[in-house]
Image (cartoon, grey):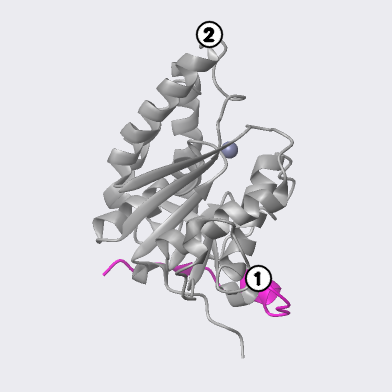
Amino acid sequence: MLVAIPDLATAERVLCIQPHYDDNDIGAGGSLAALAERGAEIVYVTVTDDQLGVREELSEGEAREVLKREQLAAGEQVGVSDQRWLEFPDGGEYDYFELRRALVAEVRRFRPDFIFTCDPWAAYEAHSDHTRVGRAAAEAAIFQRLPRFRSGVEVDRDYTPHDVRGIAFYFSTAPNVVVPIDAVRDRKHKALDAYQAQFSPVELQLLHGALELKERSWAAGQSFDYAEALKVLSPVHLHVSPDAEEVVRNQDRVVVAWT
Ligand SMILES: [Zn+2]
């Protein structure tokens, strides 16, 4: 029997692991705002220092300060309760296994029931921050419950295994879940307006427009106007699971019911 796709609407503690400071909000800001509105605790972990993507007129010192300020403003719109930064070099040659250890520590610290991250298996995704972060987050969802795996920080000592029930991948080219976002869409798009170190006003307008097209197309044929689309899996699907491909490709997309 196929292992069922976990129900996103039941998520209570959500750890959102992003390569760059705006990925969670661009990829899943509406889904996360909807969960926050339902009382879920949302925590963001930003893996890189984002120094590669900032607009050229900002010095590195200015950029660091502005990026955090913008990220906190965006997080307020979405309903993020805490943000953590790992400061790996943006687009840099950092070690995958060091990243995986850091993410296991974050999972053990917060004990989420759901993890959000970018889809590392999205067709043609070339940015190595995205492929490394998505892979390491997926592996952390499995490894965090192995007591003999050491993340190397204090949290290992008092750790008792817990289960991550689901992992939701945004920027996926094979989504299996549709999330209605009509009631919170404004908050997502207001959050994106904060990201001015990364986008010029014209680029921001283009981003809003491109996202609106996708949000409308994911909602096509449904009783709502706007949606996000995610690939949601159980950690069980993420290791030696011949069912995972079938779960993603051969089943109708599940629509999240916000009741
Ligand atoms: Zn990114």
Residue in view at x 42 percent, y 22 percent: 65
Predominant SS of the magenta segment:
loop
Secondary structure under the numbered disc 1 in the rendered image? helix
Dot placed on the residue nearer the N-terminal end, 1 or 2: 2
Secondary structure under the numbered disc 2 in the rendered image? loop
Within 8 Å: ligand 1 and the Cβ of disc 1? Answer: no
Which quadrant: the N terminus? bottom right
Q: Residue furthest top?
A: 57
Q: Which residues are magenta?
A: 239-259
Along the horizontal axis of the image, is 88 left or right of 30?
right
Residue in view at x 59 percent, y 57 percent: 152
Q: Which mark is residue 57?
A: 2
- Please state the horizontal and vertical placement of residue 204, each as a whole percent of the image: 45, 25
Residue in view at x 30 percent, y 61 percent: 40
Is residue 257 within the magenta segment? yes
Is residue 55 within the magenta segment? no
**Dot 2 alpha-carbon crowd within 10 angstroms: few under 14, some 14 to 19, many 20 or more:** few
Q: Looking at the picture, which amino acid does disc 1 mark?
A: Leu
Q: Looking at the picture, which amino acid does disc 2 mark?
A: Glu
- Please state the horizontal and vertical placement of residue 176, each as a whole percent of the image: 56, 65
- Front position in the image: 77 or 231: 77
Label 1 sits on residue: 238
